[in-house]
Amino acid sequence: MSAEQRQRAIEIRGVSRIYGEGEHRVTALSGVNLAIAENEFFTLLGPSGCGKTTLLRLIAGFDFPTDGEILLHGEDIAPLPPFKRHVNTVFQSYALFPHMTVAENISFGLQMLGRPKDEIKTRLDEMLELVHMTAMRNRQVNQISGGQQQRVALARALAPKPQVLLLDEPLSALDYKLRKEMQVELKRVQAETGITFIFVTHDQEEALTMSDRIAVMSNGEVRQVGTAREIYDQPSDRFVADFIGESNFLEGEVTTVSETSARVKLSSGVEIDASLPAGKTPSGKVTVVIRPEHASVGEPGPDHLNGTLEEAAYFGTDTHFHIRLDSGDLFTVREQNVRSVRDQHRKGERIAAHLGPSAAQILKDRS
Amino acid sequence: MRKNHFDLRAQPGFGLITLFTFFALYLPIAALVVYAFNASESLSVWGGFSTRWFVSAWNNDAVQDASIRSIVIALWASTLATLTATMAALATTRTRPYRGLTFKYALINQPLMVPEIVTAVALLIVFSRIKVWTGYSGLGYLVLAHTAFCIPFAYLPIRARLEGMDLTLERAAADLYATPWQTFRRVTLPLLRPGIIAGFMLSFVISLDDVVITEFVKSGGQDTLPTYMLGQLRRETTPEINAIATVFLALSVVLVMIFFFINRKRE
């Protein structure tokens, strides 16, 4: 079942958030539309200041949209205060209550909802079990490590069984190894609880490995929504291609268009096949994007991107070849290093980038 | 260790000045405490060790009376001042900065800036009018006057505590279904407690210690301990005064220590 067909947990309709007035007007979000399905691990990805945290705050109720609707299972929650929304948050700083124990922190939400004592106790035990913190239940929160605080924050937010869990860059304060562990941990918890997760991060790797779907944001707008593979292999515009992974951009002109691809004549005169962007038939001048690992180095020829080798940077697992194309563009090819083979390419050598099948993707925007 | 020439402690004469400062601060107090145990009736001639002046102060009805009155006024005034200051601190920190906020700070801290004698005279005039209109001449006037000048002393530590508090905690409480009142009760207030206790104790000591305003506002027979002592100085003075002051000193040291330990435990 595709994400679109499943029931929608959250639907963002034309949401804008504008701060200040007159000259001081700042548009944090403009006309955002998103549909997030139940049980989905959905990530808002973008550089700082792109509006991802603002959007999360609007869903949590810490801020209110200037315009638009936020539907939680079909009901508009945009005007409600945070304590009336069945949505919980894991904060970047964890925001654990310093005057309470681990157990008191986790029980807080259920107590505020006025649940019976025995239900709170059962749920507390469940939550402690879920995040492997049972032995720490009576500790003060300043007596546990950063990773453990993270687990408590997660348990505290999950205890009241929210319809949607919001996570605001929850792993950014952890060191590399712990972050990797918590990524796996978060995926496991999401699968076990079946709760919809909306995860905010600026870390593309984190987004690619963890998410069912990703919304890439910049300047208060959603640039592309899709699975990790869609976002990486078929970036819709230059920003997305640039922000996620490394990219080569080449200018060209569309000559012929078929159902799934087009012939693009590059400025050097070489013609290549390129995939079409979703929902748009390109014509005239276009930009194509080619990922460095979707090309390989080889002998120059009439159908290849010919140039001279400027630099070959060795990275252990792979080598990056920086080729100055005859058109003047710099083109990077990434090849995996195989131990036995291959004579060394030398700087200044005539060389070409050979494109793999469907390596090139036409972008929606014209540069 | 390399000598750091920019370190204040490395400047010539630093040790001497320090010693002098300590002597200037504590020598008079030490003398006061020592002469409280003087057996003779003199404030300056040592006549052997005795605790007679403590006993005599304890048995002095006027001292008892003034002490109880001082404590009653201080308790009322510091309670009211702390309540008001807590509300004022919440209102001035849990808001975005706006025009007029600085003016409000100034208004709250006004008793720190206006000479006490001005407030004293002003209160004397206003209260004497009210006394005539209402016929009431109880301790209420002193309590009100003390509350007014205690507010800034209670306000400052509470505000400092609020400003150091992570606002995300209150947001987290709201996120976990706590209504604004529950958030205040369960999160803000417990975290604010050390500031409130500090504010209360500071107000208590300030109220206990006040002479100028009390002297002007009090009606006949409403002496507090400081005004009683001042009155005694005009007659023959005995080390009884020293004994009272020593107990005073011990009390405030104990208060400060209690506060210190409460805070230490929380850290």
Image: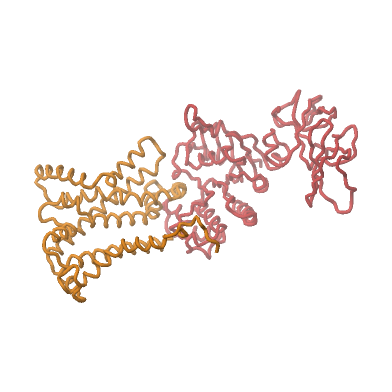
Image position of B232 with respect to B184: above or below:
below
Q: Is residue A113 left or right of residue B142?
A: right
Say which colour chain A has. Answer: red
Q: Identify the image quadrant of the C terminus of chain B.
A: bottom left
Say which colour chain B has. Answer: orange
Furthest residue to the top? A284
User: Would residue A121 be seen by someone viewing this image from the given angle?
Assistant: no
Image position of A280 with respect to B142: above or below:
above
Q: Position of residue B141 (x, y in %)?
A: 17, 49
Image position of B47 with respect to A350: above or below:
below
Q: Position of residue B204 (x, y in %)?
A: 26, 56
* Residue A354 figure quarter: top right
Q: Is residue A262 left or right of residue A153?
A: right
Front residue of A149/A297: it is: A297
**Residue, x 49% and y 51% (percent of image)?**
A95
Front residue of A144/A118: it is: A144
Q: Is residue A216 left or right of residue B39?
A: right
**Residue, x 67% and y 36% (percent of image)?**
A240
* Residue A30 figure quarter: top right
- Number of marks present in the image shown: 0
